[in-house]
């Protein structure tokens, strides 16, 4: 028996636990996609699987619902793979180690993938049931949502008849999401010049930051490890004139980086004690500045050793790399003037990496105003090209515009009030959801996104409330029952 077998809504948690046992990080969705195919075959359901691992599963309406308008249930197959530094999981081949405490589900040392594994589990439990009343169902599981909604972008929707969609990719119970920002991935590259030099190699590391979802939690004031590393290197460069050997931080462009590091080369007669004192001073500054948002932030020197000959970046290249890291925009750029407390435009430097020949800065940019999103790209391009680099863009997706006339939204509000005794919060969100792309492919699509309470998504602290899963399950079933 699985660790979640004691929970209510056993079918949902049965499928969620099976999903967690299958590696399904972004760009590694073949196994989970095939699992869904085998599920459909086992239950005698028609399905379509494409070359991008997207799956559509069809099921007829139950008795009394045969002629009802079909309904889409939708979620994504992939998860963000983040782990603690001391966790030795190989996300490409290992499943997750689940933990259950006080009806809260987590994974040991890693992200949980409740975003969006719980959506897949909900849908599979409904598809497997023989006694849940529902209209004809068109269940869409997309791939690679977390790296630009790539699956939804190429999904062939010609087989879909429904214009009603329940998206199950929200993370806060009691909120009905009806609009979202558009986004784009931006990769900026600077070419490197290296030369062999001797001196003292020093490893500098930033760690212990909170991180989080670069859309939903960009307004929390949390530090970005890559940007904070840039601030550190700029301060040290002015005083100690080093060369960068390597630099890196972050794993996903849509996750706020929690760790970043640089290996630098100082001259043989460098003032090491002065460097160490400055690092300690900066650590105290960061601890004070981020005591509420990132209380465990830590800047330290991990290692120092002499080196006879090391291929380090030239001083000119080092200066350009630091200039870019300090000057590139990051975080909130504009708040909405129409919707209170809604971030309108932002970007997140999610990945910083270096090779022998280049340094790459990877961003997730978001805005509910298309021209402001374009302007962010232009700002990055302006700086990087001036420094001798290039940029490329990918994974662009449109904003999901608010629909004033939505029978689905009004029905879901009524059902929520009946079940919970209060009104849900209808909101727009500064994060991408696939409703925007699918609305473009399915004209007049009426859709709402909702889900159970998931905390710390995209971080190893991710957790899923089992109680909230049960309430949301009952809510979902009542919605399907009333869509007749």
Image (cartoon, rainbow, N blue to C red):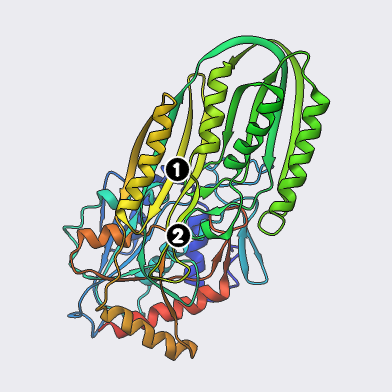
Q: CA distance from mark 2 to mark 1?
A: 22 Å
Instruction: Categorize mark 2 by other alpha carbons within 10 Å: few (<14), some (14-19), many (20+).
Output: many
Taking depth in this image into account, of 404 and 104 the one nearest to the observer is 404
Q: Is residue 155 visible?
A: yes
**In this rendering, would 344 be left or right of 463?**
left
Could one spot residue 46 in this view of the protein? no
- Label 1 packing within 10 angstroms: few (<14), some (14-19), many (20+): many
Mark carried by residue 391: none
> Residue 310: percent from the left, percent from the top?
64, 12
Image point 75% across, 31% down: which residue? 302
Q: Secondary structure at mark 2?
A: helix
Where, quadrant-wise, is the N terminus in this rendering? bottom right
Q: N-terminal of the two: label 2 or label 1?
A: 2
- Under circle 1, the secondary element is strand
Q: Position of residue 407 (x, y in %)?
A: 26, 81
Using the image as rendered, state which of residue 220 and residue 406 is in the foreground: 220
The quarter of the picture where residue 259 lies is top right
Residue wearing tag 2: 116
Which residue is disc 1 drawn over?
Answer: 363
* Residue closer to the observer: 378 or 304: 378
């Amino acid at each position: 028996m699985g660790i979640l077998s004691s929970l209510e809504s056993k079918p949902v948690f049965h499928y969620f636990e099976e999903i967690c046992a299958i590696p399904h990080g972004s760009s590694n969705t073949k196994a989970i996609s095939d699992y869904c195919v085998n599920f459909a075959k086992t239950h005698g359901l028609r399905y379509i699987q494409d070359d991008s691992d997207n799956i559509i599963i069809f099921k007829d309406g139950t008795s009394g619902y045969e002629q009802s308008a079909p309904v889409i249930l939708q979620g994504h197959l992939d998860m963000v793979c983040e782990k603690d530094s001391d966790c030795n999981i190989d996300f490409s081949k290992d499943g997750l180690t689940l933990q259950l405490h006080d009806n809260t589900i987590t994974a040991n040392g890693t992200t949980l993938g409740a975003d969006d594994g719980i959506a897949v589990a909900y849908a599979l439990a409904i598809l497997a049931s023989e006694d849940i009343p529902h209209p004809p169902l068109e269940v869409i599981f997309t791939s690679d949502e977390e790296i630009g909604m790539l699956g939804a972008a190429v999904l062939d929707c010609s087989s879909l008849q429904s214009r009603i969609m329940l998206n199950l990719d929200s993370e806060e119970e009691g909120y009905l999401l009806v609009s979202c920002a558009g986004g784009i991935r931006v990769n900026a590259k600077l070419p490197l010049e290296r030369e062999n030099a001797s001196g003292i190699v020093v490893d500098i590391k930033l760690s212990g930051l909170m991180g989080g979802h670069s859309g939903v939690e960009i307004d929390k004031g949390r530090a970005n490890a890559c940007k904070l590393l840039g601030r550190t290197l700029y301060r040290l460069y002015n005083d100690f004139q080093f060369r960068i050997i390597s630099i890196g931080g972050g794993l996903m462009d849509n996750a706020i980086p929690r760790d970043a590091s640089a290996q630098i080369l100082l001259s043989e007669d460098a003032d090491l004690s002065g460097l160490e004192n400055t690092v300690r001073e900066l650590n105290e500054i960061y601890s004070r500045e981020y005591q509420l948002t990132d209380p465990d932030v830590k800047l330290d020197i991990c290692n120092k050793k002499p080196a006879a000959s090391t291929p380090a970046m030239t001083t000119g290249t080092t200066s350009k790399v630091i200039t870019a890291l300090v000057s590139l925009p990051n975080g909130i750029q504009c708040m909405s003037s129409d919707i209170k407390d809604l971030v309108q435009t932002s970007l997140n430097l999610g990945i910083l990496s270096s090779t022998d020949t280049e340094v790459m800065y990877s961003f997730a940019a978001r805005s509910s105003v298309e021209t402001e999103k374009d302007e962010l790209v232009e700002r990055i391009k302006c700086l990087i090209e001036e420094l001798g680099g290039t940029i490329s863009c990918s994974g662009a997706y449109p904003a999901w515009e608010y629909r004033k006339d939505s029978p689905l939204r009004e029905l879901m509000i009524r059902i929520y009030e009946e079940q919970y005794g209060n009104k849900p919060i209808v909101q727009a969100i500064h994060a991408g959801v696939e409703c925007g792309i699918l609305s473009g492919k399915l004209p007049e699509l009426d859709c709402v996104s909702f889900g159970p309470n998931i905390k710390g998504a995209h971080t190893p602290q991710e957790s899923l409330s089992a109680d909230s899963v049960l309430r949301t399950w009952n809510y979902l079933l009542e919605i399907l029952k009333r869509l007749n």
